[in-house]
Amino acid sequence: MTNLTQDANCYEINHQLAYYECADSGHPSVSMVLSMMTMVSDAHSISLGLDRATVDATGGAWVVVGYDGNFASEQPTFGDQVIIGTRALAYNRFFALREFWLCDQRHQHEYVRLRALFVMMNLAKRRLMRIPDQLIVPFDSPLEKRLPRLTTPAKLGADFASQTYRVRYFDIDINHHVNNARYLDWVLDPLGADFLRRYQPQSLAIKYGEEVKEGAVVESRYRIVHHEGVVKTVHEIWSAGQCCTTAELTWQPSVKL
């Protein structure tokens, strides 16, 4: 039987990879990995009595402002039983830092390790608000004046290619803004099937800025860099004349099934 940690600070769940969570490589797509991280953080909150109604009563909602982390060369495949875990690392008045992992059932192989920075958004005013004590104290994480910084994506520069997309109704989540995982689809899709079949992510840094609205047109800008054996891509998502999201990934050769 799998030994799962489920306490105030750390929470793990079992999960069987579904076919729709995997690309044609058989491995989970990056956007689905982020969706899994959202799933376990929601489960963690609910286990502490912090359900949707409790959060809504504060007038706010949790919003991710960035991720960074690494992907192992060996990744799980469709049908595998895995563990998804999260830990509340630290917080201050306006920010909360979490870590996430995806590993095998024996905790012997770690497929993904990510950090995420959260803020509370006032849904009526669409601006940041102080994190209410009742939503953060139960996680038993330390209060720190300054939190570690996430990796800042590299600047794209003037030499880039691009592709446009329209925000669809089903890109919008329960907080009435574009789901964070959808940005990863916009970021990665322009790289093309040949690139995405040849390479798989090794590291990721993504920073979310301005909100993209329902029905908007977004431009996904990107540049592929090959330097001294390292393959890197740099990305920006633009809408209505603003840079809304930046991202940087390094890549490793795909492990064939």
Image (cartoon, rainbow, N blue to C red):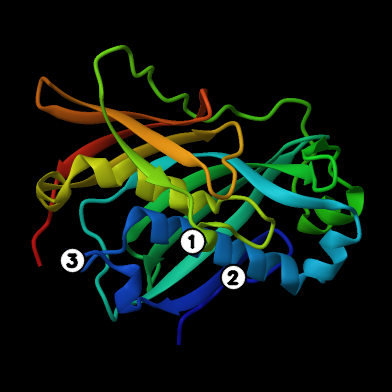
Residue at mark 2 to residue at mark 1: CA–CA distance: 20 Å
Q: Out of 229 and 64, give the one closest to the viewer.
A: 64
The residue that disc 2 covers is 5
Q: Out of 164 and 10, give the one closest to the viewer.
A: 164
Q: Earlier in the sequence, mark 2 or mark 1?
A: 2
* Mark 3 vs mark 2: in front: 3
The residue that disc 1 covers is 35
Q: Residues within 10 Å of mark 1 (few under 14, many from 20)?
A: some
Look at the numbered discs 3 and 1 and tell me whether their residues touch, using CB distance below 8 Å.
no
Tell me the kind of residue under disc 2.
Thr
Q: State left or right for residue 218 relative to residue 172.
A: left
**Rendered view: 223 above or below 11:** above
Residue at mark 3 to residue at mark 2: CA–CA distance: 32 Å
Look at the numbered discs 2 and 1 and tell me whether their residues touch, using CB distance below 8 Å.
no
**Rendered view: 21 above or below 217:** below
Q: Residues within 10 Å of mark 2 (few under 14, many from 20)?
A: few
Q: Secondary structure at mark 1?
A: helix
**Rendered view: 155 above or below 112:** above
Q: Residue at x 61, y 29 (%)?
A: 148
